[in-house]
Image (cartoon, rainbow, N blue to C red):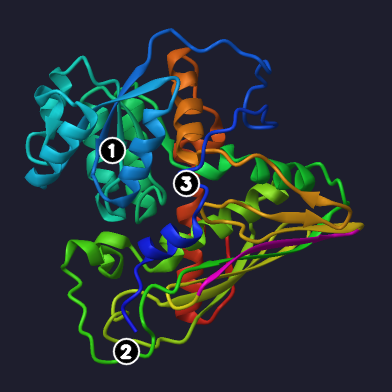
Amino acid sequence: MKNISRRSFVNKFGLGVGATVVMTTLPSYITQSEKFQKPYTGKKLNIALCGLGNYAAMLAAGIEVSEYCNLAGIVTGTPEKAVKWKKQYNIPEKNIYNYQNFDEIINNKDIDLVYVVLPNGLHKEFVIRAAKAGKNVITEKPMAISVADCEEMIKACNDNKVQLAIGYRLHYEPTHLEIKRLGQEKVFGQVRFIEASLGYKTYDTLDKKTIVDKNDRNEWRLNKKLSGGGPLMDLGIYCIQASRYVLGEEPIAITAQFGTVNDKNRFSETEESISWQMEFPSGAVANCNTSCGYNIDRFYASADEGSFELSPALSYGPFEGKTSEKELKFPVINQQQTQIDEICKVLLENKKLPNHITGEEGLKDIKIINAIYKSANTGKKISIL
C-alpha cells in the first residue's frame, strides 16, 4: 500500500474546490446582493501570495475567477516555482519576491494585499513584515502557533494601520451559514449536543518501516516548530469553529485526550489523533475529534426540538446534510473565490473587516487550542476565562 497524502485525499473527496461558481444570495455573514447584479467593473485589489504550496494553488484558481481582486505578485523560496507561476499567471518580474527581499514590497504600489500561505510557524513573521510594508494581510488558519504570536500580529497591523483577516473560508459557505442560522436562531430550540470531527488518513498505518524526514518541506506538519502541533492545528480548528458559530457562544471549560499513536517515528513531535470536549455557558457540550490516521468528516447537532447534520461537513465539500425535517441542499461554490471576494469588497469600500474573520477571532481559536493541549497533557479539565 502506497503512502497516502492529504493532498490525494482532498483531490479525491474534495470535489467542490474546482466546481463552477454558482452565484447565490447568501444569508448572515454576507451582504445581500441583487439576484441579477451587473458584473463589477471597478477597481480591483492586487494580491501577492506568500508561499506557493498546494493551498496557494487553490487560492490562485479562486482569484482567477474573482470579481474584486487580481493575482499580481508572488513570494517564494523556490526559483523553479517563481518561473512556473510567472508564466502561468502572467506575473511581472518586479512583483516576484523571495523570503529575503520580501521587505522591498513596501516600495511596490502595485501590491495592495499579501495573503500568507506559509507553514503555521511562519505566519507571525510574514504578517508582521507585510504590515510594516503597509499592506493589508490575510493569513491562513490557524493564525499562529501561540497566543503571544497572535497578539504581536494584531499589534503590528494596528500600529501600521492595515487590516488583518484570517482565512476562514467556511464563514462564507452557504451550507455553513445555514447551520449557523439554525443554531443561533434556535430554529429547533436550544442546541444541547454537538459532534464535530475531521480527519484524513494521511499515511499507511500498517507501514512500520518508512522513516520520515521532518525537515523535508513537504512534511512540515510533522515538524512542531513549523506546525505548532498536529491535526488539531490543521484540521481540528474547523471543529472548534463550527461549534462556536453554531452555538454563538465561547467554551468555558475543556477536557481532552490524545489518541493512539500508530507510528511513533512519524508522530514523535506532534499528535496523530486527539479528542476533546467543550462545555459552553448554555450547558451545551461539543464532542470533537481530529486525526491524521483515519478519515472522518461530519457534524451533528441535537437541539430540544430537532437536529441537523452534515457529512461531508468540514472539508472542501461538496457538503451534504439534513435537518430532522428536510434535506439541506445549497449550491456548490468556489470557497476560495467567495472568501477572497468578500474580504476584498470590504477593503475596497474602505470599511472595517467584520469581527468574525479578524485577528481577534484567530486569537480566540489559539487560546482554545492551547487549552485542549494543556488538558490532554495533564489529564485535567481546563477552564477558559
Foreground label between 1 and 2:
2
Question: Disc 2 marks which residue?
Answer: 207
| Mark 3 secondary-structure assignment | loop
Q: Nearer the viewer, mark 2 or mark 3?
A: 3
Above or below, comparing residue 206 to residue 187 in the picture: below
The image position of residue 188, as x and y in percent, is: 88, 51
Q: Residues within 10 Å of mark 3 (few under 14, many from 20)?
A: many
Res 161 quadrant in image = top left
Disc 1 designates what residue? 127
| Residue 79, quarter of the rendered image | top left
Residue bearing the label numbered 3 = 17
Residue at the image point whose x is 52% and y is 12% from the top: 39
Residue 276 appears at what percent x and percent y? 58, 72
Q: Can the viewer see residue 79 in this picture?
A: yes
Magenta part of the chain? 295-304
Q: Return the disc, 1 or 3, that comes first in the chain's sequence.
A: 3
* Residue 77 place in picture, x, y as percent: 11, 46
Q: Position of residue 66 (x, y in %)?
A: 43, 26
Task: Describe residue 184's horizontal placement relative to residue 324 as left or right.
Answer: left
The residues bearing labels 2 and 3 have C-alpha atoms spaced at a distance of 31 Å
Q: Tell me the kind of residue under disc 2.
A: Asp
Q: Residues within 10 Å of mark 2 (few under 14, many from 20)?
A: few
